[in-house]
Image: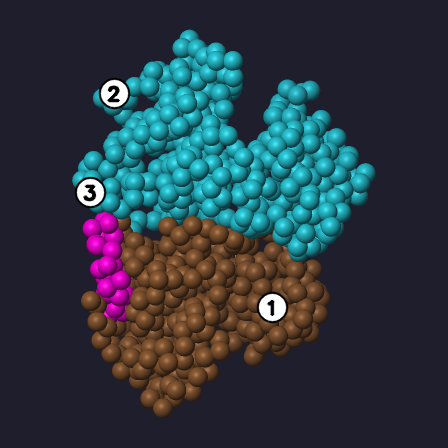
């Protein structure tokens, strides 16, 4: 087996998973030496009744400093500072973040402020600016997609000064991630499918892009196997607890894989579609994933073909001739998208022209593609893509992803 | 794949592996908040190139470094007490351990002593009543072959045994450049516990996707690189470094599961054998797997994927996989046997065990086998391993 010349791997977050592991929160807090946690979440999570579920198992055993439920989707420094104020005022000694990426990023920001007693967060931006462990942080994800409960970065916007601050440190990793099947049991089908494809894109890009290593490969492979066995089971039976838990674990494994191996052009283009047209991240990932594999095929067919075992299972793998496996992987992912399209009655779009907002209006106008392609060139993930992606090729990929037609691979500029 | 159920997994170890990994030490120290590390190692290693390279790397970065190179062959409390003084008087705030076995065990228990500020470690042993909380930053740099517990949650000091996830290093740096040629038997006796721990984590019970991922990678890397690591060919250093990395991964898996049957049997045998217990594990492993292959709560057949790769796995019919796995393990052992000029013990007789010792060994295990394999089963495994009974692969 070939090993990378040099690689790093870290999966330091303690992961507690199960059907009734919220009940362990008091014990986990105790292990972390904390007595009075601040709970941070957003309105959606709160209104779905998930916070009640968390607090009801804690109430008898742990006091709660405060429950703050108003983290907005575009959280910023003002929110961070306000919540840090609450933390101090109530004398809290730990943070529990319940929700997705924005909630967790906000919680990480609050943690820097309260742990370092910082008045200016800017002093802690960049890599390695944090020098010691922060206050205990517990992450409880409420979707099975982003894997943000295992990532070591936080992005906090400063709307006033119109800038985004990026923080990177192992001290930003949550101490514990709690994956409880009850947290994702009520997700509607279109969210389940989009977030699952987000997780799949993490695993697939981690395995096929440039910064892979044998450990990230193993995590990616495990994530894909769980997704293969559980995604459609859960789509058919949304209240399948076992399936829900497996998807949550899969998203976590995929999060570990990509935060160690980085991602490529599916994310490059996806971030840009999200920024220009406000399409949900998972939706962008689902649509672009087969195109990323198709575009890079002449560089990494070997890795892509290896994915057929975890994604298709051993019968399909053994029954497909070696030189056909990579293409089979791509068509298999397209099949998944098509099945999800039908299962969600069209809400899970197969191509960008099918993406609509709640009122039914198209969200990605054809004439925005040029802006999207241009904006993509500034995304960091572009460096880890196997083939160099220039703006013309980005445009070509976007046009196909908009129409829902396969790439003409002869037209790819091969470097 | 076995579906995850209620489960907790933690592996605090960051792994930096490969060429010029040593160059990342200053960055890693800064990232864990260590400003003044104390490096501990052995006299032998201190004279080799490894240590000067590490020191040179640190000197350039301006990190002040203390060095103690007087760790013996065993981890001793008196060394820990002496080091505790060195650590506190020198104002150190982190530990770097370079070497294997005794150095790492000393580092773990020293970390406990300086964090708790006490030389009385007995209350923290597995039999004691004190819990171990977060310790000081600790970096491990494997540079020689040890006992297979280096990066695990286990520590041994004199006759005391400790166990805590807090003992695990924050960072393990594996750089091919630090390894020097060693007796192949030593390398094998360090690698076999890793292979055994990874295999036992992978076949279950207590299998979960996180343990699987670490175990899978460790198995794959040991199976592919161990022969090259002892073979002394052109690429032996890269292979040796891959084996050390795999040992780290296996340690992470092992720290998250209950010890398996091979581990338990080898511990019992090791007390009477005239060889390191790692070699006993190698002898016992195929017989234990053969024994467990009939049970439906163990997944011996699934080992074929990490051992042989996807192609062989997919074209081998399900019912033939176990046989293939056992063949591959025996082939690996035979290859090692050949490359050690037939010095590698292959049976329990080879390591000085007599038939009449087996019964008491099996009996002593009767109440500690977590896999509900009864004394009779244990005895059967030991008897077969005693003489190297051929395994029926059908």
Residue B274 sits above or below residue A356 on the image: below
Residue at 72 percent of width and 37 percent of height: A67
Identify the secondary structure beneath mark 3: helix
Please provide percent x and percent y for residue A40: 68, 36
Name the quadrant containing residue B243: bottom left
Residue designated by label 1: B109
Residue at position x 27%, y 46% from top? A314
Please report the residue visible at 27 percent of the width from the left and 25 percent of the height from the top: A414
Q: Residue B155 placed where, x, y %?
A: 55, 69
Q: Colour of chain B?
A: brown
Residue named by callout 2? A408
Residue B348 lies, in percent from the top left, at 32, 81
User: In this structure image, what is the colour of chain A?
Assistant: cyan
Reading the image, the residue beneath label 3 is: A319
Q: Helix, strand or loop at disc 2?
A: loop
**Which chain contains the residue that carries disc 3?**
A
Question: Which residue is nearer to you in this view: B83 or A32?
Answer: A32
Mark count: 3
Q: Is residue B316 magenta?
A: yes
């Amino acid at each position: 087996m070939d090993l990378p010349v040099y690689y790093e791997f870290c999966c330091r977050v303690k992961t507690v998973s199960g059907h009734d592991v919220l009940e362990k929160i008091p014990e986990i807090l105790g292990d972390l030496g904390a007595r009075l946690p601040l709970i941070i979440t957003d309105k959606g999570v709160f209104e779905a009744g998930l916070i009640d579920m968390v607090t009801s198992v804690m109430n008898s055993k742990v006091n709660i400093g405060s429950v703050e439920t108003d983290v907005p989707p575009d959280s910023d420094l003002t929110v961070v500072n306000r919540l840090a104020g609450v933390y101090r005022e109530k004398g809290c000694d730990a943070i529990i973040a319940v929700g997705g990426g924005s909630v967790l990023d906000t919680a990480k920001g609050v943690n820097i402020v309260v742990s370092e007693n910082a008045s200016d967060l800017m002093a802690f931006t960049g890599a390695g600016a944090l020098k010691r462990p922060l206050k205990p942080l517990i992450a409880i994800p409420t979707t099975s997609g982003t894997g943000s409960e295992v990532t070591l970065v936080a992005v906090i916007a400063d709307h006033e000064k119109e800038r985004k601050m990026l923080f990177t440190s192992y001290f930003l990793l949550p101490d514990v991630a709690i994956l409880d099947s009850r947290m994702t049991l009520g997700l509607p089908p279109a969210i389940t499918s989009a977030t699952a494809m987000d997780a799949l894109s993490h695993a697939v890009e981690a395995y096929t892009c440039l910064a892979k290593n044998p450990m990230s490969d193993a995590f990616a492979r495990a994530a894909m196997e769980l997704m293969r066995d559980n995604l459609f089971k859960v789509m058919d039976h949304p209240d399948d607890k076992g399936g829900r838990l497996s998807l949550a674990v899969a998203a976590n494994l995929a999060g570990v894989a990509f935060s160690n191996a980085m991602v490529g052009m599916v994310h490059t283009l996806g971030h840009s579609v999200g920024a220009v047209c406000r399409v949900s991240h998972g939706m962008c990932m689902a649509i672009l994933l087969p195109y990323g594999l198709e575009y890079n095929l002449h560089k990494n067919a070997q890795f892509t073909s290896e994915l057929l075992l975890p994604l298709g299972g051993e019968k399909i793998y053994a029954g497909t001739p070696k030189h056909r496996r990579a293409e089979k992987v791509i068509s298999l992912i397209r099949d998944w998208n098509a099945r999800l399209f039908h299962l969600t009655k069209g809400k899970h779009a197969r191509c960008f022209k099918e993406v609509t907002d709640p009122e039914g209006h198209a969200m990605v106008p054809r004439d925005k593609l040029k802006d999207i392609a241009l904006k993509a060139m500034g995304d960091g993930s572009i460096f880890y893509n196997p083939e160099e992606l220039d703006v013309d090729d980005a445009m070509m990929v976007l046009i196909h992803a908009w129409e829902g037609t396969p790439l003409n691979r002869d037209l790819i500029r091969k470097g | 794949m076995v579906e995850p159920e209620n489960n907790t997994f933690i592996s605090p170890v960051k792994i930096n592996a490969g060429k010029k990994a040593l160059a990342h030490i200053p960055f890693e120290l800064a990232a864990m908040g260590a400003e003044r590390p104390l490096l501990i190692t052995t006299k032998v290693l201190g004279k080799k190139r490894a240590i000067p390279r590490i020191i040179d790397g640190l000197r350039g970065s301006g990190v002040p470094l203390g060095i103690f190179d007087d760790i013996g062959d065993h981890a001793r409390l008196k060394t820990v007490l002496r080091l505790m003084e060195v650590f506190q008087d020198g104002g150190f705030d982190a530990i770097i351990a370079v070497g294997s076995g005794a150095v790492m065990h000393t580092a773990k228990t020293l970390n406990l002593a300086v964090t708790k500020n006490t030389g009385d470690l007995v209350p923290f042993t597995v039999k004691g009543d004190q819990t171990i909380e977060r310790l000081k930053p600790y970096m491990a740099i494997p540079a020689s072959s040890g006992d297979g517990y280096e990066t695990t949650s286990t520590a041994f000091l004199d006759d005391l045994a400790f166990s805590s996830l807090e003992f695990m290093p924050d960072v393990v740096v594996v750089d091919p450049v630090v390894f020097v040629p060693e007796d192949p038997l030593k390398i094998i006796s360090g690698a076999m516990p890793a292979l055994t721990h990874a295999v036992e984590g992978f076949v279950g019970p207590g299998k979960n996707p996180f343990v699987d991922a670490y175990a899978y990678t460790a198995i794959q890397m040991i199976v592919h690189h161990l022969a090259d690591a002892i073979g002394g060919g052109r690429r032996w250093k890269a292979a040796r470094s891959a084996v050390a990395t795999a040992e780290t991964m296996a340690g992470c898996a092992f720290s998250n599961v209950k010890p398996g049957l091979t581990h338990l049997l080898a511990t019992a045998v090791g007390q009477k054998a005239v060889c390191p217990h790692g070699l006993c594990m190698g002898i016992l492993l195929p017989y234990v797997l053969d024994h467990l292959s009939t049970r439906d709560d163990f997944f011996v057949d699934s080992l074929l994927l990490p051992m042989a790769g996807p192609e062989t796995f997919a074209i081998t019919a399900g019912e033939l996989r176990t046989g293939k796995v056992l063949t591959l393990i025996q082939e690996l052992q035979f290859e090692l046997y050949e490359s050690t000029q037939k010095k590698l013990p292959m049976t329990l007789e080879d390591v000085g065990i007599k038939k009449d010792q087996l019964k008491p060994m099996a009996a002593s295990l009767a109440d500690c086998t977590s896999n509900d394999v009864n004394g009779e089963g244990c005895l059967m495994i030991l008897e077969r391993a005693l003489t190297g009974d051929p395994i029926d692969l059908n």
